[in-house]
Amino acid sequence: MSLNNFQEYKNKESGALDTNPQNRPKYVQKVQSIPQAEIWRNIVLGEISSKLTQINDTQTSDARLRELNDALNQLFKEKRSWEYHIKNLGGNDYIHNTKDMINSGVNVAGWRYFGRAKELPDVKTMIEEKKRQNKRGNGGESKDLEKRLDDYYYGKQKDSNQLLEFESRRSRELRKSEENVTKVSLKDLPDQEKFAQWIATKNVKE
């Protein structure tokens, strides 16, 4: 056993927290200590911060941008795993943090692109296509629908002469049709006595 391994063993036995990034476990479930899980999360955050700095560097090559972007996606996934695990252990809730660094990336088909990786030709094309789809879809559809809706629906404009003319003509047609309907007066209706006689006569005939 090397000196380093021996020291790590002694630290583990004494309950000391491990801060060596190389010892970060692949599966978060192996860690049952909230303080230790917090340390691994902080180490992941440090790696994310470092790579975000590199991916925004104008001197970084296109190939390196792709490598950094892939690594960032994996690190953000690992960070979220630690955050869910910490919450399940009864620790802090980082899940609903709206200031998460992941929001600096653009999500395209489930994969995020950060910094200058968004300027790569193929990535730029995908991002522009997504914007066009969004415009045609949710946001654009809503705006188009609002434009198509008649202003009268919202009461924004007064009735035009054309609409008034149509309503006037329609009203005249309705009045004329009502005049052609046979009108029945109440005095033309049979009273109770006449109705009883009619029933009796009908029964005799049957």
Image (spheres, rainbow, N blue to C red):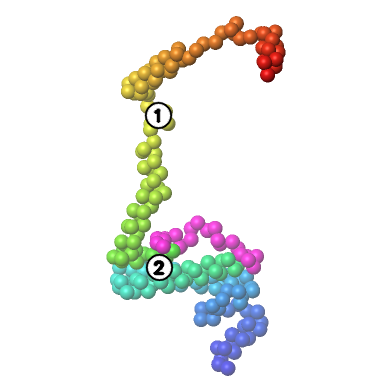
Q: Secondary structure at mark 2?
A: helix
Q: Nearer the viewer, mark 2 or mark 1?
A: 1
In the image, taking residue 124 as reference, residue 42 lies left or right, namely: right
Which of these two is toward me, 167 or 112?
167
Left or right: 105 in relation to 11: left
Quadrant assignment for the C terminus: top right
> Which amino acid does the dot numbered 2 rest on?
Leu
Residue 125 is situated, as x and y percent measured from the top left of the image, at 31, 61
Query: Badge 1 local density, few (<14 within 10 Å), some, or many (20+)?
Result: few
Which mark sits nearer the N-terminus, 2 or 1? 2
Q: Is residue 100 magenta?
A: yes
In this orientation, does residue 50 appear?
no
Q: Which residue is mark 2?
A: 52
Residue 70 vertical placement versus 199 (above, below): below
Pinpoint residue 101: horizontal percent, then vertical percent: 46, 62
Q: Is residue 49 above or below residue 170?
A: below
Q: Who's the residue at 61% across and 86% down the image?
A: 9
Which stretch did the figure color magenta?
87-109
Element at label 1:
helix
Among all residues in the image, which is located at the extreme top? 187
User: What residue type is disc 1 on?
Assistant: Tyr
